[in-house]
Image (spheres, rainbow, N blue to C red):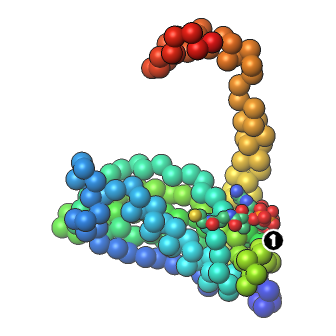
């Protein structure tokens, strides 16, 4: 069953825990979003490279919502696992939690899905091992990733042309309740 061209999810499951240092704070005293994004990219890379057995690049991120602020001094843990494998791409699901060590309060701050592409030495995408699904949870995540991929394709098609020339001509009306100002004689 454990063919060498297939790997389990647990083979590449990765957790990184990092202390949020004062140097990571933004002007509001909370942890800067870019720090968390960088950690997410790092854990996605580790997980993807472990599965692929080669180096990988980040192709896409779906999507990043910061649900709760992260405080300096908290421990941020990023749990990553391969949710889906295509031909040369794999989708890594990442759950980010932040823990206050004194109060033991744990916050769920993000869940994101990183699409990583495995590359060969000539920087061309190469085939990655398939995924052995061992639990109903892993099956659910694989199917959900397939659905998100399909949904994104449809969404991208629908949003290719978002405005018509007529809408631009009628922008004064269209934007009258928006928080913007059209330069005089623009249209
Ligand atoms: C990602 C990259 C390698 C894809 O190259 P490409 O020429 O489009 O390659 P392909 O068309 O063969 O696609 C390869 C795979 O990537 C997937 N892919 C490509 N772009 C994607 C995107 N934006 N979102 C999701 N998947 C994507 C394709 O679906 C395909 O998956 P599959 O092999 O499992 O079917 C290329 O766009 C690249 O190098 N991007 C820059 C990556 C990078 O530098 N990341 C760091 C950001 S600073």
Q: Is mark 1 within 8 Å of ligand 1?
A: yes
- Where in the figure is residue 61, as x and y percent of width and height? 59, 57
**Lateral position of residue 117 relative to residue 182, left or right:** right
Quarter in which the C terminus is drawn: top right
- Where in the figure is residue 170, as x and y percent of width and height? 66, 10
Q: Quadrant of residue 160?
A: top right
Which residue occupies the foreground of this view, 132 or 62? 62
Eyeballing the image, is 60 above or below 118? above
Q: Is residue 151 visible?
A: no
Quarter in which the N terminus is drawn: bottom right
The residue at which mark 1 appears reads as 87
- Where in the figure is residue 17, as x and y percent of width and height? 38, 75
Q: Is residue 119 visible?
A: yes
Quick one: which residue is furthest to the front in this view?
A: 185
Residue at 32 percent across and 51 percent down: it is 69
Q: Quadrant of residue 171?
A: top right
**Lateral position of residue 29 relative to residue 144, left or right:** left
Residue at 71 percent across and 25 percent down: it is 163
Indicate which quadrant contains ligand 1.
Answer: bottom right
Which residue occupies the foreground of this view, 102 or 119? 119
Q: How would you rate the neighbour count of disc 1 (Cα within 10 Å): few for under 14, some for 14-19, many for 20 or more?
A: few
**Lateral position of residue 184 relative to residue 53, left or right:** left
Which residue occupies the foreground of this view, 139 or 176? 176
Which residue occupies the foreground of this view, 42 or 5? 42
Q: How many marks?
A: 1
């Amino acid at each position: 069953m454990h063919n060498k061209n297939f790997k389990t999810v647990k083979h590449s499951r990765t957790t990184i825990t990092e202390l949020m240092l004062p140097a990571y704070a933004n002007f509001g005293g909370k942890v800067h979003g870019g720090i968390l994004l960088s950690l997410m990219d790092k854990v996605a890379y580790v997980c993807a490279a472990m599965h692929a057995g080669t180096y990988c690049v980040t192709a896409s991120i779906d999507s990043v919502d910061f649900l709760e602020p992260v405080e300096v001094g908290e421990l941020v843990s990023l749990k990553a696992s391969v949710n889906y494998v295509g031909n040369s791409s794999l989708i890594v699901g990442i759950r980010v939690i932040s823990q206050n060590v004194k109060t033991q309060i744990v916050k769920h701050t993000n869940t994101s899905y990183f699409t990583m592409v495995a590359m060969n030495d000539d920087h061309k995408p190469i085939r990655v091992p398939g995924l052995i699904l061992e639990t109903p949870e892993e099956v659910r995540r694989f199917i959900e990733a397939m659905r998100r991929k399909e949904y994104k394709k449809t969404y991208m098609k629908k949003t290719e042309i978002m405005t018509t020339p007529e809408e631009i001509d009628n922008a004064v009306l269209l934007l009258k309740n928006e928080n913007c100002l059209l330069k005089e004689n623009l249209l």
